Image (cartoon, helix red, strand yellow):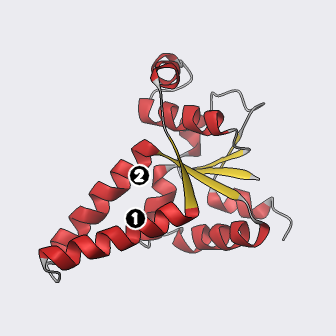
Amino acid sequence: MKIFFDTNIILEFLQQRMQADLVEQILELASQRGDELYISVGSFYTITYIIEQHLRRTKSYSPEDRLKKLRNILSGILDEFKIIWHNNETLLAGVTDSAFYDLEDSYQHQAALMAGCKYLLTINDKDFAKIDTSRITITTPQQFLNNQKI
């Protein structure tokens, strides 16, 4: 099964926010089943920036150690997730999709569709309320786990 992770899902896990345990359960389940996990290249850029800023704020790393830690974290993400690149066609589809008020969500949706994902995991499922769900299911981590046969 192909599962797309919105940026907020990855950040939820990495920053140990409220739903981090749910995301961890999904990652474990996906690993056991051999699911394919996807994020967009835009998510990867955002995640890189946020982790780097967090490491800078901790001030407990030298610049060399901070870079080493950042590279280790990002390498781990690349080991788990396939990256979906956008092209002019998918970005234009995202820009012009009237189902979205937040264009970043529209780009995520287009990336998930391009990858042929069955699910798009997000914390902000209301931002996807107007889309055609015949091609992809939008779900929160809790909803996803509730609907999986474990």
Secondary structure under the numbered disc 2 in the rendered image: helix
Q: Is residue 136 visible?
A: yes
In whole angstroms, how far apart are the C-alphas of marks 2 and 1? Answer: 8 Å
Q: Is residue 102 visible?
A: no
What residue sits right under mark 1 in the picture? Answer: 74
* Residue plotted at (43% across, 35% down): 104
Q: Is residue 105 above or below residue 143?
A: above
What amino acid does circle 1 point to?
Leu
Q: Work out which residue is located at the far right of the displayed protein and give it.
A: 149
Work out which quarter of the rendered image holds the C terminus and state it. bottom right
Q: Is residue 144 above or below residue 27?
A: above
Location of residue 27 by image quarter: bottom right
| Side of 88 where 114 appears, left or right | right
Give x and y (percent) for residue 107.
Answer: 49, 32
Location of residue 15 by image quarter: bottom left
Q: Is residue 32 above or below residue 92?
A: below
| Mark drawn on residue 127 | none
Give x and y (percent) for residue 77.
Answer: 48, 64
Q: Work out which residue is located at the far bottom of the displayed protein and give it.
A: 60
* Residue plotted at (77% across, 53% down): 1
Crowdedness near tag 2: few (<14), some (14–19) or many (≥20) residues, C-alpha within 10 Å? some
| Side of 26 where 148 appears, left or right | right
Give x and y (percent) for residue 53.
Answer: 22, 63
* Residue plotted at (71% across, 50% down): 2
The foreground one among 68 and 60 is: 68
Dot 2 and dot 1 residues touching (CB under 8 Å): yes
What residue sits right under mark 2 in the picture? Answer: 44
Secondary structure under the numbered disc 1 in the rendered image: helix
Q: Is residue 107 above or below residue 32?
A: above
What amino acid does circle 2 point to?
Phe
Sequence-wise, the earlier of marks 2 and 1 is 2
